[in-house]
Image: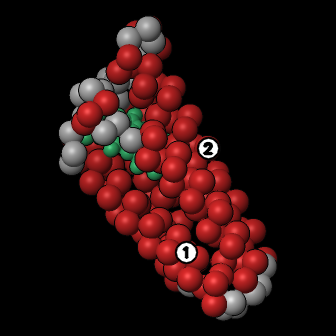
Amino acid sequence: MNALIRAHSGLRYVVLALLIAAIFTAYSNWQKGASGDSKIYLFAFIATHTQLLLGLILYTMSAKVNFDLISEKVFRFYSIEHIFMMLIAIVLITVGRIRSKKLTGPAKHRTVLYFYAMGLIIILVAIPWPFRNLGSGWF
Ligand code: HEM
């Protein structure tokens, strides 16, 4: 359980780094009018889905997921807000990935850019950063 939390916590930085790299690549490919796919889009997608898998396992085990204590900030955050926002973000990234695969030319990269950027913003908001006082640290 502890190892799972550590993995889920540390993987956030991999997810963030890959999403940012994918977004920059998509912007640059779009502007250049490039047509091919980029592996970085796939890697960002895989990292996000790995995080989803770890999150789903944690959700079934975590003491911070408790609907009897839903009026308390930390429990409400993990039981509802964190999972809800992360699921929306991951759906957006998935839609971006699938749609972009069917497209060619600049539209492909623009689709990745828009959907991954929307996903990234939601993920940034839904991470329990230390300054939000939800009992979680930087790692
Ligand atoms: C990209 C998506 C996600 C990111 C970046 C992320 C990030 C994090 C971080 C940084 C923590 C704090 C860990 C700590 O206290 O050290 C956390 C905790 C948690 N996450 Fe996520 N998460 C994501 C998606 C999900 C999803 C989809 C679920 C549920 C299905 C989920 C369930 C949980 C749970 C239950 C905890 C609390 C674990 C505990 O301390 O008991 N996460 N997440």
Amino acid type at circle 2 is Ile
Q: Tell me which amino acid carries mark 1.
A: Tyr
Position of residue 75 in the picture relative to residue 131 (left or right): right
Q: What residue sits right under mark 1 in the picture?
A: 41
Which structural element holds mark 1? helix
Which residue, as the protein is rendered here, is positioned at the far front?
A: 31
In this rendered view, identify the residue nearer to me: 63 or 32: 32
**Can you see residue 29?**
yes
Which residue is at 51% across, 55% downward? 120
Q: Is residue 27 left or right of residue 105?
A: left
Residue 99's x, y, as percent?
A: 75, 68
N-term mark: 1 or 2: 1
Residue at 64% across / 84% down in the picture? 31
Residue 18: give x, y in percent of width and height.
42, 69
Q: Quick check: 129 above or below 28?
A: above
Question: Where's residue 30, x and y in %?
Answer: 65, 82
**Callout 2 environment at 10 Å: few (<14), some (14 to 19), or many (20+)?**
some
| Residue located beneath label 2 in the image | 88
